[in-house]
Protein backbone atom coordinates (compact mmCIF):
# COMPACT_ATOMS: atom_id res chain seq x y z
CA UNK A 1 0.00 0.00 0.00
CA UNK A 2 1.75 3.09 -1.23
CA UNK A 3 1.83 6.11 1.02
CA UNK A 4 0.69 9.61 0.18
CA UNK A 5 2.36 10.57 -3.09
CA UNK A 6 3.19 14.15 -3.92
CA UNK A 7 4.74 15.49 -7.07
CA UNK A 8 6.82 17.20 -8.01
CA UNK A 9 9.20 17.07 -5.05
CA UNK A 10 10.79 20.33 -6.10
CA UNK A 11 9.28 23.07 -8.21
CA UNK A 12 10.90 26.30 -9.34
CA UNK A 13 8.72 29.05 -10.74
CA UNK A 14 9.39 32.63 -11.79
CA UNK A 15 7.29 35.38 -10.27
CA UNK A 16 3.94 35.60 -12.04
CA UNK A 17 3.87 31.98 -13.20
CA UNK A 18 1.45 29.31 -12.03
CA UNK A 19 2.36 26.42 -9.73
CA UNK A 20 0.44 23.14 -9.68
CA UNK A 21 1.08 20.69 -6.87
CA UNK A 22 -0.35 17.18 -6.99
CA UNK A 23 -1.28 14.77 -4.25
CA UNK A 24 -2.52 11.19 -4.45
CA UNK A 25 -3.88 10.01 -1.08
CA UNK A 26 -3.32 6.60 0.40
CA UNK A 27 -5.63 3.87 -0.84
CA UNK A 28 -8.90 3.92 1.05
CA UNK A 29 -8.43 7.48 2.26
CA UNK A 30 -11.17 9.88 1.23
CA UNK A 31 -9.97 12.95 3.15
CA UNK A 32 -7.17 15.15 1.86
CA UNK A 33 -5.52 18.09 3.59
CA UNK A 34 -2.97 20.62 2.41
CA UNK A 35 -0.50 22.32 4.76
CA UNK A 36 2.22 24.88 4.19
CA UNK A 37 5.46 25.14 6.13
CA UNK A 38 7.53 28.29 6.05
CA UNK A 39 11.17 28.18 7.23
CA UNK A 40 11.53 27.75 11.02
CA UNK A 41 7.76 27.43 11.39
CA UNK A 42 5.30 24.66 12.05
CA UNK A 43 2.88 23.42 9.44
CA UNK A 44 -0.12 25.66 8.80
CA UNK A 45 -3.45 24.24 7.69
CA UNK A 46 -4.66 25.45 4.32
CA UNK A 47 -7.58 23.35 3.11
CA UNK A 48 -9.51 20.14 3.78
CA UNK A 49 -11.15 18.33 0.88
CA UNK A 50 -13.18 15.23 0.22
CA UNK A 51 -13.95 13.90 -3.23
CA UNK A 52 -15.44 16.75 -5.27
CA UNK A 53 -16.01 18.85 -2.15
CA UNK A 54 -14.10 21.54 -0.29
CA UNK A 55 -14.93 21.01 3.36
CA UNK A 56 -12.85 23.75 4.98
CA UNK A 57 -10.67 26.29 3.20
CA UNK A 58 -10.28 28.69 6.10
CA UNK A 59 -6.49 28.53 5.96
CA UNK A 60 -6.17 29.28 2.29
CA UNK A 61 -5.33 32.81 1.10
CA UNK A 62 -8.39 34.32 -0.55
CA UNK A 63 -6.61 35.22 -3.77
CA UNK A 64 -4.45 33.23 -6.18
CA UNK A 65 -4.82 29.92 -4.30
CA UNK A 66 -7.28 27.17 -5.15
CA UNK A 67 -7.60 23.46 -4.47
CA UNK A 68 -9.60 20.60 -5.86
CA UNK A 69 -10.03 16.88 -5.33
CA UNK A 70 -11.87 15.54 -8.38
CA UNK A 71 -13.79 12.31 -8.57
CA UNK A 72 -10.94 10.78 -10.54
CA UNK A 73 -7.28 11.66 -10.17
CA UNK A 74 -5.14 13.42 -7.61
CA UNK A 75 -5.87 16.46 -5.52
CA UNK A 76 -4.39 19.65 -6.99
CA UNK A 77 -3.23 22.75 -5.16
CA UNK A 78 -2.96 25.59 -7.64
CA UNK A 79 -1.17 28.87 -7.02
CA UNK A 80 -1.60 31.53 -9.67
CA UNK A 81 0.76 34.45 -10.26
CA UNK A 82 3.26 33.21 -7.68
CA UNK A 83 5.23 35.69 -5.57
CA UNK A 84 8.45 35.17 -3.59
CA UNK A 85 6.44 34.84 -0.36
CA UNK A 86 4.84 31.67 -1.73
CA UNK A 87 8.19 29.90 -1.46
CA UNK A 88 7.64 27.15 1.10
CA UNK A 89 7.21 23.43 1.57
CA UNK A 90 3.69 22.28 0.80
CA UNK A 91 2.56 19.05 2.41
CA UNK A 92 -0.44 16.95 1.58
CA UNK A 93 -1.94 14.51 4.07
CA UNK A 94 -4.75 12.00 3.89
CA UNK A 95 -6.87 10.09 6.36
CA UNK A 96 -9.71 7.59 6.30
CA UNK A 97 -13.21 8.84 7.08
CA UNK A 98 -13.36 7.38 10.61
CA UNK A 99 -13.00 9.66 13.61
CA UNK A 100 -9.92 9.67 15.85
CA UNK A 101 -7.58 8.58 13.11
CA UNK A 102 -4.24 10.03 12.26
CA UNK A 103 -3.38 11.78 9.03
CA UNK A 104 -0.50 10.46 6.96
CA UNK A 105 1.70 12.96 5.19
CA UNK A 106 3.43 12.92 1.85
CA UNK A 107 7.03 13.98 1.40
CA UNK A 108 6.06 17.45 0.33
CA UNK A 109 6.67 19.75 -2.60
CA UNK A 110 9.29 22.42 -2.08
CA UNK A 111 8.27 25.46 -4.10
CA UNK A 112 10.88 28.08 -4.87
CA UNK A 113 9.84 31.31 -6.54
CA UNK A 114 12.67 33.18 -8.24
CA UNK B 1 -2.19 33.80 18.21
CA UNK B 2 -0.33 30.54 18.65
CA UNK B 3 -2.73 27.92 19.95
CA UNK B 4 -0.12 25.14 20.20
CA UNK B 5 3.24 26.01 21.69
CA UNK B 6 6.45 24.06 21.88
CA UNK B 7 8.62 26.33 23.96
CA UNK B 8 11.87 24.39 23.59
CA UNK B 9 13.32 24.78 20.10
CA UNK B 10 15.89 22.11 20.80
CA UNK B 11 16.73 19.28 23.19
CA UNK B 12 19.86 17.19 23.50
CA UNK B 13 20.00 13.85 25.38
CA UNK B 14 22.35 10.91 25.70
CA UNK B 15 21.58 7.62 24.06
CA UNK B 16 19.70 5.33 26.42
CA UNK B 17 18.29 8.15 28.54
CA UNK B 18 14.76 9.50 28.50
CA UNK B 19 13.72 12.30 26.12
CA UNK B 20 10.81 14.47 27.27
CA UNK B 21 9.25 16.82 24.75
CA UNK B 22 6.65 19.28 25.95
CA UNK B 23 3.69 20.99 24.35
CA UNK B 24 1.18 23.51 25.69
CA UNK B 25 -2.10 24.55 24.13
CA UNK B 26 -4.57 27.34 24.73
CA UNK B 27 -7.75 26.15 23.02
CA UNK B 28 -9.86 24.13 25.47
CA UNK B 29 -11.89 22.81 22.53
CA UNK B 30 -9.01 20.64 21.31
CA UNK B 31 -9.98 17.00 21.76
CA UNK B 32 -7.38 15.04 19.82
CA UNK B 33 -3.61 15.39 20.01
CA UNK B 34 -0.86 13.91 17.87
CA UNK B 35 2.91 13.81 17.75
CA UNK B 36 4.78 13.73 14.46
CA UNK B 37 8.46 13.26 13.77
CA UNK B 38 10.12 14.93 10.81
CA UNK B 39 13.47 14.45 9.15
CA UNK B 40 14.88 17.17 6.86
CA UNK B 41 13.37 17.21 3.37
CA UNK B 42 10.76 14.60 4.31
CA UNK B 43 7.14 14.74 5.35
CA UNK B 44 6.03 14.37 8.98
CA UNK B 45 5.69 10.80 10.19
CA UNK B 46 2.94 9.97 12.65
CA UNK B 47 4.20 8.71 16.02
CA UNK B 48 1.41 8.54 18.55
CA UNK B 49 -1.91 10.19 19.39
CA UNK B 50 -4.20 10.65 22.34
CA UNK B 51 -7.85 11.51 22.69
CA UNK B 52 -8.93 14.03 25.32
CA UNK B 53 -10.84 11.31 27.17
CA UNK B 54 -7.53 9.68 28.10
CA UNK B 55 -4.53 10.91 30.05
CA UNK B 56 -1.94 8.45 28.79
CA UNK B 57 -1.22 6.43 25.69
CA UNK B 58 1.74 4.15 25.21
CA UNK B 59 3.25 2.58 22.11
CA UNK B 60 6.57 0.84 22.52
CA UNK B 61 9.23 3.37 23.49
CA UNK B 62 6.81 6.27 23.08
CA UNK B 63 4.35 7.48 25.70
CA UNK B 64 2.17 10.56 25.50
CA UNK B 65 0.73 12.15 28.65
CA UNK B 66 -2.15 14.60 28.59
CA UNK B 67 -2.95 17.00 31.44
CA UNK B 68 -6.17 18.72 30.42
CA UNK B 69 -6.39 21.00 33.44
CA UNK B 70 -2.94 22.37 32.65
CA UNK B 71 -3.52 22.23 28.88
CA UNK B 72 -0.23 20.41 28.60
CA UNK B 73 0.97 17.27 26.90
CA UNK B 74 4.32 15.60 26.77
CA UNK B 75 6.01 12.90 24.73
CA UNK B 76 8.39 10.55 26.50
CA UNK B 77 10.86 8.47 24.53
CA UNK B 78 12.70 5.82 26.48
CA UNK B 79 15.29 4.64 25.86
CA UNK B 80 16.35 7.31 23.37
CA UNK B 81 18.27 6.17 20.30
CA UNK B 82 20.41 8.16 17.83
CA UNK B 83 17.84 7.41 15.12
CA UNK B 84 15.31 9.39 17.13
CA UNK B 85 17.18 12.58 16.25
CA UNK B 86 14.65 14.67 14.31
CA UNK B 87 12.23 17.54 14.71
CA UNK B 88 9.14 16.62 16.73
CA UNK B 89 5.86 18.41 16.16
CA UNK B 90 2.91 18.48 18.49
CA UNK B 91 -0.47 18.89 16.76
CA UNK B 92 -4.05 19.30 17.97
CA UNK B 93 -7.55 19.16 16.54
CA UNK B 94 -10.95 20.17 17.84
CA UNK B 95 -12.85 17.88 15.50
CA UNK B 96 -12.12 14.49 16.99
CA UNK B 97 -9.74 13.47 14.28
CA UNK B 98 -7.09 14.74 11.91
CA UNK B 99 -9.15 17.50 10.34
CA UNK B 100 -7.56 20.93 10.44
CA UNK B 101 -4.58 20.12 12.66
CA UNK B 102 -2.92 23.01 14.49
CA UNK B 103 0.83 22.45 14.78
CA UNK B 104 3.45 23.75 17.15
CA UNK B 105 6.74 25.05 15.75
CA UNK B 106 8.59 21.89 16.64
CA UNK B 107 11.42 20.77 18.92
CA UNK B 108 14.66 19.52 17.42
CA UNK B 109 15.80 16.45 19.35
CA UNK B 110 19.41 15.34 19.17
CA UNK B 111 20.32 11.99 20.72
CA UNK B 112 24.06 11.71 21.22
CA UNK B 113 25.73 8.27 21.03
Image: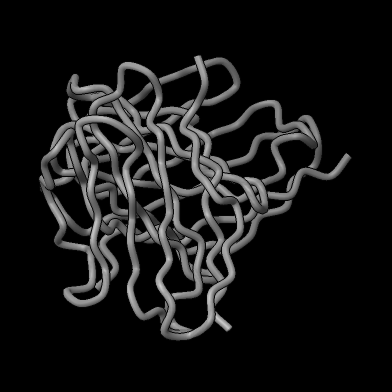
Left or right side of A1 for B34: left
Q: How many discs mark residues in the rendered view?
A: 0
Left or right side of A78 for A90: right
The residue located at (55%, 43%) in the rendering is: A107
Q: Is residue B83 above or below residue B100?
A: above
Q: Quadrant of residue B80?
A: top right
Q: Nearer the viewer, residue B103 or A1?
A: A1
- In the rendered image, residue A44, in percent from the top left (x then y), is placed at 34, 60
The residue located at (37%, 61%) in the rendering is: B5
- In the rendered image, residue A22, in percent from the top left (x then y), is placed at 42, 47
The residue located at (42%, 32%) in the rendering is: A104
The residue located at (53%, 81%) in the rendering is: A14
Q: Is residue A10 above or below residue A106?
A: below
- In the rendered image, residue A13, in percent from the top left (x then y), is placed at 53, 74
Left or right side of A112 for A84: left
Q: Is residue B90 above or below residue A90?
A: above
**Split into 4 quadrants, where in the image is the C terminus of chain B?**
top right
Amino acid sequence: NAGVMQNPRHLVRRRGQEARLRCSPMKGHSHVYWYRQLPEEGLKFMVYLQKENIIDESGMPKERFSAEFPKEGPSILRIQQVVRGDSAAYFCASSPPQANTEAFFGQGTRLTVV
Amino acid sequence: DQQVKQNSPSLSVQEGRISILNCDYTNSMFDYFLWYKKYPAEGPTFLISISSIKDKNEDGRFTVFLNKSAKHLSLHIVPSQPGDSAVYFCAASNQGGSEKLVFGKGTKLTVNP
